[in-house]
Image (cartoon, rainbow, N blue to C red):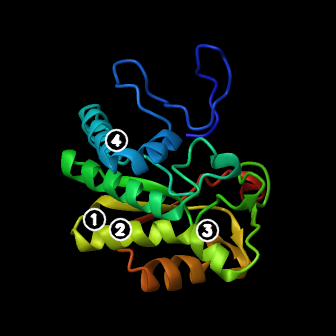
Amino acid sequence: GGGLTMTPSGRSIPGIQRFRTGFTDLAHGIWLGRSTPLVGTELCELHGRIMSRELSAAGINFPLTLVADLAYGLFSVRGVSTNADVVSKCVASFTAAAAKAGPVIVVTKHFPGLGGNRGDTHDVESTSSARDLNEAERHLSPFANVIATANSYRFEDRLSIMSSHGKFPFFDPDHLTTESSILLEKILRDRLGFRGIRVSDAMWMGQYGQ
């Protein structure tokens, strides 16, 4: 989840683990990303297996897990990396390992990638700061690669994607993602071949909720 005050120091840390008592302590996404160039996707896979087994044992089978947003701004700790290839490899291997380990549907977010957006969707209408289509596509690419991996290895029914309430003018200048048939149908479903469950971010959030 987002910034939560659940640390021993009382500080709010983005993406801190919500469930602690009785569960294995897991690393922030950024540490998984830093490990990937050193040991490959081993820790990403390990975290997927642990999270899947422990949450499914507790009766939770639709967990909001590792984010596919590039690790800029609000996602500097929650995100895996600023490198889209590293994010793609880690999130895809995490999802595959989780799908194999337990009866869960893994949810990644926040499509099509909030790492380059200005403002927090909890508070305002957050708009992409991408200067051209290539930059916007770079934030989208981890989702594309995770979907391709899921389809290739036939665990597409174990992958769910959460749409953001962000606005991405290079894809759809007129609508937030949640309301955009261009992003959710023409791009996510038709172009990227996503076959799983689409879910929106919280409906009360920010300007969208108002």
Identified at 67% across, 27% down, the residue is: 12
Identified at 51% across, 86% down, the residue is: 186
Mark sitting earlier along the chain (4/3): 4
Distance from disc 1 to disc 2, alpha carbons, whole Å, reads 5 Å
For the residue pair 23 and 185, the one nearer the viewer reads as: 23
- Give how far across and how far down residue 37 sits, in percent: 42, 51
The residue beneath circle 2 is 196
Distance from disc 1 to disc 4, alpha carbons, whole Å, reads 23 Å
The kind of residue tagged 3 is Thr
Distance from disc 4 to disc 3, alpha carbons, whole Å, reads 32 Å
Mark sitting earlier along the chain (1/4): 4
The residue beneath circle 4 is 43
Q: Residues within 10 Å of mark 2 (few under 14, many from 20)?
A: some
Mark sitting earlier along the chain (3/2): 3
Mark sitting earlier along the chain (1/3): 1
Distance from disc 1 to disc 3, alpha carbons, whole Å, reads 21 Å
Q: Residues within 10 Å of mark 4 (few under 14, many from 20)?
A: some
Distance from disc 4 to disc 2, alpha carbons, whole Å, reads 25 Å
Mark sitting earlier along the chain (4/2): 4
Query: Does residue 14 appear left or right of residue 101 in this picture?
Result: right
The kind of residue tagged 4 is Leu
- Give how far across and how far down residue 79 sits, in percent: 55, 49
